[in-house]
Image: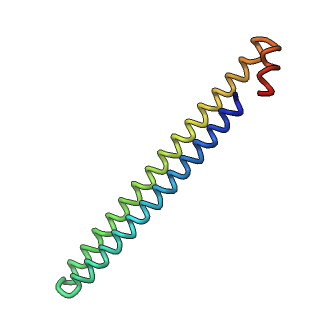
Amino acid sequence: MIMMMLLLLLVMMMMMMMMMMMMMMMMMMMMMMMMMMMMMMMMMMMTTMTTMVKMMTMMTMMMMMMMMMMMMMMMMMMMMMMMMMMMMMMMMMMMMTKNCIPKRSSSSSSSSSPA
């Protein structure tokens, strides 16, 4: 039973990790796309805009990028925290089960251990 639970936990962890990786990839792609778009826009405007406006636009773009990065970090942190909490909960459950098993009876414990 405990072994099964552990296996399940492992699978869940793997799934979570995969999801995190996927999310990261997606975010990165989005960031790249945004960067490309910005660059294109900048190139387009280069001829018409003054230096001051250029600078302003650049600053705004940078700020936006930073914000996106921050959001990503926050999301990652949250995910990690959730995973840790789940792990702790599972551990607690394991401990409880382990403590409870011997008290019931020797025969039941012996029968459960091989399975």
Nearest the eye: 105 or 88: 105
Q: x, y percentage for residue 38?
A: 30, 74
Left or right, 48 with reference to 81: left
Q: In which quarter of the image is residue 55?
A: bottom left
Nearest the eye: 40 or 57: 40
Instruction: Please name the residue shown 53% across and 46% down the image.
Output: 80
Vertical comparison of 63 with 102: above or below: below
Nearest the eye: 3 or 46: 3
Vertical comparison of 97 with 45: above or below: above
Vertical comparison of 38 with 90: above or below: below
Q: x, y percentage for residue 46?
A: 23, 85
Quarter the N terminus occupies: top right
Vertical comparison of 110 with 40: above or below: above
Q: In which quarter of the image is residue 65?
A: bottom left
Nearest the eye: 30 or 38: 30
Left or right, 47 with reference to 100: left
Q: Residue furthest bottom?
A: 47
Q: Which residue lies furthest to the left in this view?
A: 48
Q: x, y percentage for residue 104?
A: 75, 11
Left or right, 114 with reference to 32: right
Q: In which quarter of the image is residue 26?
A: bottom left
Quarter the C terminus occupies: top right
Instruction: Please name the residue shown 59% across and 44% down the image.
Output: 13
Q: x, y percentage for residue 10?
A: 64, 42
Numbered-mark total: 0
Instruction: Please name the residue shown 69% across and 26% down the image.
Output: 95
Instruction: Please name the residue shown 32% across and 63% down the image.
Output: 64
